[in-house]
Every structure is written in structure tokens, then in C-alpha cells.
């Protein structure tokens, strides 16, 4: 902190944002078009990729993805570490813990269901943790760009590594898994 900056506003925020959920929500509202999603979008745009932002991949399914490639049928989700229960950063709040636990379970079930629905319509869901995107937006953009490119999609279609637990895998593996999972379902 620079000399002369006051810490008072931050303290006020903290007392006002009395739960982790409120804090996470404030952070995500602040970050809607700033970071880390924008960091990835900017890079994708620089790669001449065109996409839609915060739309439903499938119009009659009430689920919104963060970055959507309609022609390639790829839906990118950047999952917040708090709301989606990142194994590295999620800390269960001590107050109202039952409420927060139930909320997390619901969110994760919803994520799984969303992925299944997308796959059933021939879409590829790609999920990244917020912290992965913050740490290395270049890498995440490269993974997304690879998944979108027809050559890579064809290569993945003609057989890739074995499917594993998608959720904890690295983004690269998750891209491949979602392809393989897609194949398994459609064959
Ligand atoms: Zn995390």
C-alpha cells in the first residue's frame, strides 16, 4: 500500500460484507467485465476467435455459459472458487454452515447437470477454475483456442487419452475428456 492511502474503506467493506458469499458476490459483480474472464476474452479476441458472452448455449435450456462458440458448439465456464467449491480454495463458512454446504452441493449438481445437458445436445462444456484463469490466462486461452480449432476437434474425435475425473484434471485433460465423454455417449 502506498504511503498516505487509507485502510478505512476496506475495513468498512469487510464489516458490511458479513458473509463469504456476500464478499464473493461483491467480488464477482465488480469483476464481471474486468477479470479474470476478460483476460481470457481479450486473448481469444487477439487470436481472431469470435464468441458470444454470457448467453445460453441452448436457447430452451435455462443455463448461461461465460464464453460461447456457437458454431464449434463449445461452452466455456469460469467457475468461481467459492461458489463452485474449488478443492484448493473453498473454505466452508463457519456461520450458517448447513446453508452454505447445501448451497454448494446444489451448485455442483447443477454444474454436472448443465454439462450433461450440453453434451446431450452435442456441445462441449469446458470448465476452468477462477484461480487457474487468474494464474495463467494465456494458458487457458490457448486451451480454449485449441478446443475450438477444427483440426484439434477432429484429432480429439478420432481418439484421445482415457477419460478420467474431469473435475480435478488439468484444463488440457478436461478438454480431451469432454470430447471423449461426448463420443462415448453418442456411440
Ligand atoms: Zn481455486
Image (cartoon, rainbow, N blue to C red):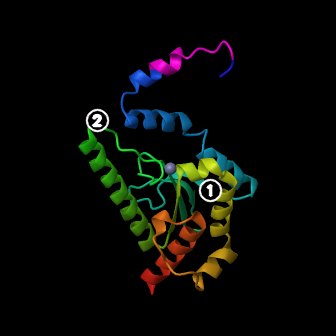
Q: First in sequence: mark 1 or mark 2?
A: 1
Numbered range of the magenta stretch: 3-12
Please give the name of the residue rendered at 41% of the width and 55% of the height, measured from the top-left corner: 63
Q: Residue 124, how many percent across, how many down?
A: 52, 69
Q: Is residue 138 left or right of residue 109?
A: right
In the rendered image, which residue does mark 1 sit on?
51
Residue extending farthest top: 4
Above or below residue 95? Residue 50 is: below
Q: Nearer the viewer, residue 102 or 147?
A: 102
Q: Is residue 179 left or right of residue 24?
A: right
Above or below residue 90? Residue 13 is: above
In the rendered image, which residue does mark 2 sit on?
95
Q: Residue 62, how many percent across, how many down?
A: 38, 55
Q: Residue 11, how many percent across, how many down?
A: 48, 19
Q: Nearer the viewer, residue 40 or 55?
A: 40
Question: Which one is closest to the eye, mark 1 or mark 2?
Answer: 2
Ligand 1 has an atom within 8 Å of the beta carbon of the residue at disc 2: no
Q: Residues within 10 Å of mark 2 (few under 14, many from 20)?
A: few
Q: Secondary structure at mark 1?
A: loop
**Real-space CA distance between mark 1 and mark 2, rounded to the nearest whole angstrom:** 40 Å
Picture quadrant where residue 144 is located? bottom right
Q: Is residue 167 left or right of residue 150?
A: left
Locate the C terminus and report the quarter of the image it occupies.
bottom left
Q: Secondary structure at mark 2?
A: loop
Amino acid at each position: 500500500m502506498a504511503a498516505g492511502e487509507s485502510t478505512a474503506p476496506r475495513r468498512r467493506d469487510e464489516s458490511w460484507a458479513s458473509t463469504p458469499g456476500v464478499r464473493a458476490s461483491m467480488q464477482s459483480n465488480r469483476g464481471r467485465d474486468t477479470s479474470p474472464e476478460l483476460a481470457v476474452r481479450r486473448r481469444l479476441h487477439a487470436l481472431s476467435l469470435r464468441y458470444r458472452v454470457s448467453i445460453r448455449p441452448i436457447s430452451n435450456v435455462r443455463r448461461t455459459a461465460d464464453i460461447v462458440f456457437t458454431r464449434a458448439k463449445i461452452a466455456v465456464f469460469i467457475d468461481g472458487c467459492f461458489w463452485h467449491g474449488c478443492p484448493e480454495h473453498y473454505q466452508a463458512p463457519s456461520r450458517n454452515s448447513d446453508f452454505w454446504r447445501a448451497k454448494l452441493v446444489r451448485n455442483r449438481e447443477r454444474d454436472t447437470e448443465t454439462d450433461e445437458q450440453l453434451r446431450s445436445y452435442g456441445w462441449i462444456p469446458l470448465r476452468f477454475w477462477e484461480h487457474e484463469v487468474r494464474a495463467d490466462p494465456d494458458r487457458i486461452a490457448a486451451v480454449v483456442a485449441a478446443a475450438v480449432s477444427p483440426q484439434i476437434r477432429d484429432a480429439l474425435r478420432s481418439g484421445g487419452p482415457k477419460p478420467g475425473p474431469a473435475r480435478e484434471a488439468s484444463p488440457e485433460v478436461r478438454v480431451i475428456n469432454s470430447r471423449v465423454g461426448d463420443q462415448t455417449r453418442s456411440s
